Image: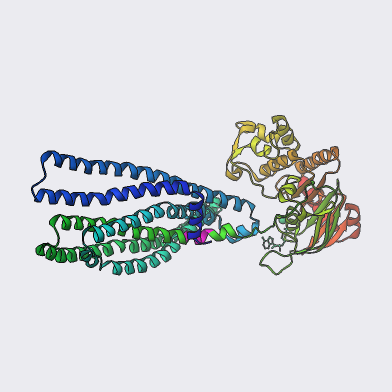
Amino acid sequence: MTLTSLIARYVRQNWRPYLLAALMLASVSALTVFIPRHVGHIVDAMAAGRLEDAELVRQLGWLVLAGVLIYFLRVAWRLQLFAASYRLGAELRTRLYGRLCLQGPHFFHQRGTGDLMALATNDIDAVEMASGEAMLAGFDGTLTLIMVVAMMTLGIDWRLALVALLPFPFMAFAFWRISSHIHQASKDSLECFGKINDHVQETLTGVRTLRALGLETRSAARFSELAENAASASLRAQRWEAAFEPAVGIALVSATVLTLGLGGALVWQGALTIGALTAFSMYLGQLIWPMFAAGWVLSLLERGRAAWGRLQPALDTPLSIDDHGTQTQMPAGAILFKGVSFSYPGHQALALSGIDVRVMAGHTLGVVGATGSGKSTLVRLILRQYAASEGEIKWGAHALADYPLDTLHQSLSWVPQEPFLFSASIAENIGLAKANAARADIENAARLACIDEDIARMPQGYDTPVGEKGVSLSGGQRQRVAIARALLADAPLLLLDDALSAVDTQTETSILQHLQELRKASPGKTTVIVSHRLSAVMDAQHIVVLKDGRIAEQGTHASLLGLGGWYADQWRYQQLQASLDAD
Ligand code: ADP
Ligand code: MG
């Protein structure tokens, strides 16, 4: 869809305010062209000496009335039109936001967060301006132009009009050249702004790392480079916009010279009255607005087109995960991986290959292996953040893809290694898992996740706010808040992806114990525990050891120890380390 068709569609859908605005604008134009003609008549009447005082006052009264009416109509159409264009902005923002919420991780790897934020603010603003301001200026300018030219040709003298309008085609040509430059400069400027946003967002997120590494000056230098680029692109756009004005000026001055030359001659010959010539030059002056409007509209439209060119891909990128599942039942039963292989989009290497695993309902699966062996990837496939490249994952009788994402996500809770906490109180962060969770349930979940004592020590207890991403909490505390959230949800499937890595072994053991008791109390609930600490999975019914994306060993804790492979070695090593730590 082009910007033009977007705006056309929007105007069709919201024809009422646009029509109302157009009618009011038309009245304004009619009143505006009425004034010079009326002044012309007054001048002629005065010159002929047949205007009495009372009549003059009455005629001037009409002029004042026209002025007042123009004022009110201008206010009213602005209100109509801007309300409509702001609604379009809101609609586009809602669409963009909804779209972003549905995109998978791959999309966000490709586009910076800051740039996406710029799309939602700056670029949509530009489209909004094109659909409001540009429409009104375009309509108003065209209408005024038609009326003024009609009055000049039909109302006064067509020969004079023909000569006076000679310079304008040249001006139109100049406008056309200028606007193509504005398009390019606007595109550059919007892109630079997106990059600035990206940089600021990244810097603020990683400000502590940046300081710790002493990289502030480098980051600041990069920022000022970006800011300068943005400034120079904006300046370039402004410079081209500024070129509109002299073009209008030159055209008008030439037109005035031609008018006075030919008009003077016509008056001399008695073919034109002085009043008509006065009116004609006032009309010429009234052409200034349509000319400026044309320049203004062109630059707004070019800005809007550049913005739309950036926005549209974000709105139209197909969702990285299709959500066409039709299964209405909630998923239940065993989870089955059948010959699953997967490589990340744009990567050749297989992150997982030939995975065959079955987890019975109510069982716990342990997943262990070295860093980079594919543990998190396996979890991401269950979450359907990505789809398997080969093979099939089933939950119960149906493939994962048969469930709508919404249903699937309601049936599982996921705790990643670095959980996200929202800018809200601790209680609210835990309570997110369950609509209208009672305070007692939240506190119980916190107790099971062994975070209750930490919370009790906080200044406002459960009502203590945690900043964006929970900056005021330690990594281990954040993990336990997230675990409490998952325990409160008590979903049919619980996925813990190294979710206790920052918690000490003793606390981990008691959390896992609580977890087991809880899951046992309501049978059929399945758990997948990914951990680098083998003690976390030793009680699982089944354990798989991943190596380079393949299953290297699998079995129960006892059978894996008997196998004498990676698991057995790792177990001995971790036991030794634990006994050393205890000393
Ligand atoms: P683990 O959780 O066992 O440490 P991961 O599942 O995170 O390992 O990673 C498995 C492999 O996939 C690694 O080789 C890693 O480099 C690669 N990988 C992980 N995430 C991505 C990604 N978003 N894009 C491309 N490759 C990735
Ligand atoms: Mg991982």
Q: Nearer the viewer, residue 498 or 534?
A: 498
Q: How many labels does the image show?
A: 0
Q: Nearer the viewer, residue 450 or 438?
A: 438
Q: Quadrant of the N terminus?
A: bottom right
Residue 17 position, x and y percent, is 45, 46
Q: Seen in the image, is 307 located left or right of residue 466? A: left
Residue 225 position, x and y percent, is 43, 62
Q: Residue at x 13, y 64 (%)?
A: 266
Q: Main secondary structure of the magenta part?
A: helix
Q: In this view, does 84 lie above or below 449?
A: below
Q: Quadrant of the C terminus?
A: top right
Q: Is residue 309 magenta?
A: yes
Q: Which of 126 and 20 is in front in this view?
A: 20
Q: In which quarter of the image is ligand 2?
A: bottom right
Q: Seen in the image, is 554 located left or right of residue 264? A: right
Residue 254 position, x and y percent, is 21, 66
Q: Is residue 575 magenta?
A: no
Q: Seen in the image, is 274 located left or right of residue 23? A: left
Residue 220 position, x and y percent, is 45, 57
Q: Seen in the image, is 159 located left or right of residue 7? A: left
Q: Is residue 524 above or below residue 398?
A: above
Is residue 266 at least partly visible in the picture?
yes
In the rendered image, the residue lying farthest to the left is 49
Q: Which residue is drawn at 17% across and 56% down?
A: 276
The image quadrant that residue 368 belongs to is: bottom right
Q: Give the range drawn in magenta.
A: 306-311
Q: Residue at x 69, y 57 (%)?
A: 322
Q: Nearer the viewer, residue 531 or 140?
A: 140
Task: Identify the coloring.
Answer: rainbow
Is residue 583 at least partly visible in the picture?
no
